[in-house]
């Protein structure tokens, strides 16, 4: 792995963040009671404070693509997050860890392991997700395996890194 950092002339440089991420099938269940969601899986690999999304959930499809968290880890196989949804989740939902860029200017190189998405809702200054699934519109901004650095400017909520389960490393550098 290279030790080189991405730096733009005339900017200050924060420590580079390397993202090696994962995508896991939720093996057991997702229980939605209208206040909290409880996810049980063989091993979820999340820590308290993380954000996640899901794909392939049926029954309650509003779980798919929306931002959920911050999660509270209760054990290596169970975590919870605020969620106003109720009902039965069916299918084979897949948990995908998310990373949100802090407010500022970033240079990003994506590996095959994920892509950067943006939310076009123009919700400047929006706080963390409220558990209602209302942020389900996310569009691709930087595709996976974009080896040339791309720049993004964010308010701290409108961009997220979403994994795709492939083994690789992406690099994120805040430059201003």
Image (tube, grey):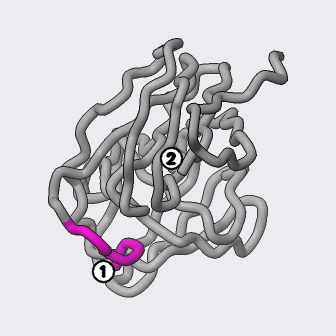
Q: Position of residue 19 (x, y in %)?
A: 66, 37
Characterize the magenta stretch by its predominant secondary structure.
loop
Look at 64% across and 48% down and name the residue there.
12
Mark 1: which secondary structure?
A: loop
Of helix, strand and loop, which one carries label 2? strand
Residue 84, numbered circle: 1
Q: Position of residue 23 (x, y in %)?
A: 56, 36
Q: Is residue 108 left or right of residue 129?
A: right
Question: Dot 2: within a 10 Å radius of its alpha carbon, few (fewer than 14), some, or many (20 or more) residues?
Answer: many
Q: Depth check: give the residue in front, 36 or 72.
A: 72
Q: Residue at x 47, y 56 (%)?
A: 104
Q: Which residues are magenta?
A: 123-130
Foreground residue, 138 or 12? 12
Q: Which quadrant holds residue 117?
A: top left
Which residue is under mark 2?
95
On whether residue 158 falls in the magenta region, the answer is: no
Quadrant of the snapshot with the N terminus: top right
Residue at image position (57%, 40%) is 10
Give the mark nearer the N terminus: 2 vs 1. Answer: 1
Q: Is residue 15 left or right of residue 35?
A: right
Residue pushed farthest front? 10
Q: For mark 1, does the 10 Å Cα neighbourhood hold few (<14), some (14 to 19), or many (20 or more) residues?
A: some
Farthest residue to the left: give it: 121
**Could you say which is closer to the camera, residue 125 or residue 28?**
125
Task: Looking at this view, name the residue that lies furthest to the bottom.
Answer: 35
Picture quarter containing residue 140?
Answer: top left
Question: Residue 175 has which mark?
Answer: none
Q: From the viewer's perspective, is residue 100 above or below residue 146? A: below
Spatial CA distance of label 2 from label 1 is 18 Å
Question: Where does the image place residue 153, in percent across and percent down from the top left?
Answer: 38, 48
């Amino acid at each position: 792995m290279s030790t080189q950092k991405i730096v733009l002339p005339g900017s200050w440089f924060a420590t580079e963040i390397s993202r090696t991420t994962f995508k896991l099938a939720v093996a057991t269940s997702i229980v939605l009671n209208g206040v909290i969601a409880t996810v049980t899986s063989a091993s979820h690999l999340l820590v308290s404070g993380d954000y996640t999304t899901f794909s392939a959930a049926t029954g309650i499809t509003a779980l798919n693509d929306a931002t959920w968290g911050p999660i509270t880890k209760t054990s290596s196989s169970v975590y919870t997050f605020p969620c106003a949804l109720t009902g039965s989740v069916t299918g084979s939902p897949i948990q995908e860890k998310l990373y949100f860029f802090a407010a500022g200017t970033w240079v990003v190189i994506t590996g095959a392991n994920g892509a950067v998405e943006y939310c076009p809702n123009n919700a400047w200054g929006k706080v963390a997700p409220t558990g209602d699934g209302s942020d389900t519109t996310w569009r691709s901004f930087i595709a996976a395996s974009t080896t040339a650095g791309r720049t993004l400017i964010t308010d701290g909520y409108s961009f997220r890194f979403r994994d795709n389960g492939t083994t690789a490393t992406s690099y994120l550098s805040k430059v201003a």
